[in-house]
């Protein structure tokens, strides 16, 4: 049994129905047949919880069932955008597959620290076997006054605590680096916009600086800090200058306001932001005569940015396969409950999507289906009485 919520926002989430329908019509299925040996292509990163890491690729064979109907608690910052809805979809579908119970709680936003601490206390005192913590703050556990008495794994976001030694997600520094590197490589190829290294070696080159505006989400919360650092690292040696750096919660209306002030101030060559910011930018630039002059780059994928890629209105998006992250989180926490050692820093490979390389069959682990509504509870199947 599942419980879900059908709010107006989530009905609007069906914007990508046509794209998902294309995948279904083409015969691409999210499920795997019972006879197939399913493996997931993942990355193991070391050192744990570090910004700069070494990566080892691995082929992971997921569980077929759980030994017990474990009860799992998942805490997430919010379910206001496609990113965390995709995580929820992965969590729910995997819990159903393995026959474990799941209850999910959202803090409402990245500013809901007090609420998430209350939810953590609830999960710690209730009859859950383990907790998946998608924290609103890397330092959250330092402010938790209770006793950590249950296994806890970090979900998506960095969690700084010696009590947690498994994190399922990707390196957000690398998410930013991929987006910044796209801009660096693209501008280096554009006539009249040569990079700084070329300009330093050729005094006759007077390439004009490329202006980049950043709209990266809540300041110093979630993964925004490391995303920004990754962008800056990737842009070193380029002729790109940051003309504006703005932050807001992941709310499209807030980003519309930010974009209004940004475009009133100047017209950058690129806008790089969270998927919610880029969704707002697609609409805002459609009203402007200079829309074609500003390239949009998203730090992660959403249905609207995917449509933008298909329509050549978005130039690039990082894709960290959020559905697979959710599925992996359930699989890993069950394995650890059943005796496995901590998995360290583990997650999918980051993909770089452009209008020229999108393949629908490769996106089933990247976005929830268009008709999926957030689900907050999965109940484990009741045991069948023995004759």
Image (cartoon, grey):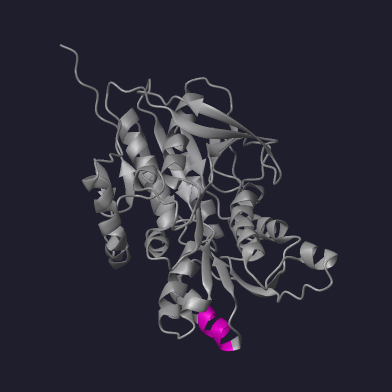
Q: Residue at x 28, y 21 (%)?
A: 35
The quarter of the picture where the C terminus appears is top left
Foreground: 355 or 346? 355
Above/below status of 225 relative to 120: below
Magenta stretch bounds: 258-264
Is residue 260 within the magenta segment? Answer: yes
Classify residue 268 as left or right of residue 331: right
Classify residue 74 as left or right of residue 143: left
Q: Residue at x 57, y 67 (%)?
A: 272
Q: Is residue 32 visible?
A: yes
Is residue 150 within the magenta segment? Answer: no
The quarter of the picture where the N terminus appears is top left
* Place of residue 79 in the rendered image (x, y in percent of width and height, measured from the top left): 41, 57
The majority secondary structure of the magenta stretch comes to: helix
Q: Quadrant of residue 128?
A: top left
Q: Residue furthest bottom?
A: 264
Q: Residue furthest top?
A: 387
Q: Residue at x 28, y 39 (%)?
A: 29
Above/below status of 319 relative to 270: above
Q: Is residue 10 visible?
A: no
The number of discs equals 0
* Place of residue 374 in the rendered image (x, y in percent of width and height, measured from the top left): 33, 53
């Amino acid at each position: 049994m599942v419980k879900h919520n059908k709010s107006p926002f989530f009905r609007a989430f069906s914007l990508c129905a046509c794209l998902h329908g294309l995948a279904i019509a083409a015969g691409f299925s999210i499920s795997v047949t019972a006879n197939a040996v399913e493996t997931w292509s993942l990355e193991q990163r070391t050192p744990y919880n570090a910004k700069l890491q070494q990566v080892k690729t691995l082929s992971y064979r997921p569980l077929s069932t759980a030994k017990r109907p474990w009860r799992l608690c998942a805490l997430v910052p919010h379910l206001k955008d496609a990113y965390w809805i995709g995580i929820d979809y992965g969590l729910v579908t995997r819990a159903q597959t393995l026959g474990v119970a799941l209850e999910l709680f959202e803090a409402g936003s990245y500013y809901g620290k007090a609420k998430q601490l209350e939810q953590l206390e609830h999960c710690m005192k209730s009859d859950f076997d383990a907790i998946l913590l998608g924290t609103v703050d890397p330092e959250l556990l330092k402010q938790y006054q209770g006793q950590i008495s249950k296994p806890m794994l970090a979900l998506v976001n960095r969690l700084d605590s010696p009590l947690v030694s498994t994190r399922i997600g990707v390196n957000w520094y690398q998410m930013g680096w991929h987006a910044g590197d796209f801009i660096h490589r693209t501008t280096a190829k554009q006539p009249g916009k040569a990079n700084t290294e070329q300009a330093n070696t050729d005094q006759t080159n007077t390439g004009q600086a490329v202006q980049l505006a950043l709209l990266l989400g809540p300041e110093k919360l979630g993964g925004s800090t490391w995303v920004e650092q990754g962008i800056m690292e990737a842009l070193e040696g380029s002729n790109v200058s940051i003309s504006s750096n703005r932050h807001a919660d992941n709310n499209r209306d807030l980003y519309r306001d930010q974009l209004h002030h940004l475009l009133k101030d100047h017209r950058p060559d690129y806008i790089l932001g969270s998927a919610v910011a880029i969704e707002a930018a697609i609409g805002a630039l459609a009203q402007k005569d200079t829309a074609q002059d500003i390239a949009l780059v998203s730090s992660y994928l959403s249905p609207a940015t995917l449509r933008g890629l298909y329509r050549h209105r978005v130039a690039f998006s990082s894709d960290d396969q959020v559905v697979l992250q959710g599925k992996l989180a359930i699989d890993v926490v069950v394995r650890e409950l059943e005796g496995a050692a901590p998995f360290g820093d583990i997650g999918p490979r980051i993909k770089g999507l452009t209008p020229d390389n999108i393949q629908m069959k490769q996106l089933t682990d990247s976005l929830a289906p268009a008709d999926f509504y957030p689900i907050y509870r999965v109940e484990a199947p009741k045991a069948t009485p023995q004759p």
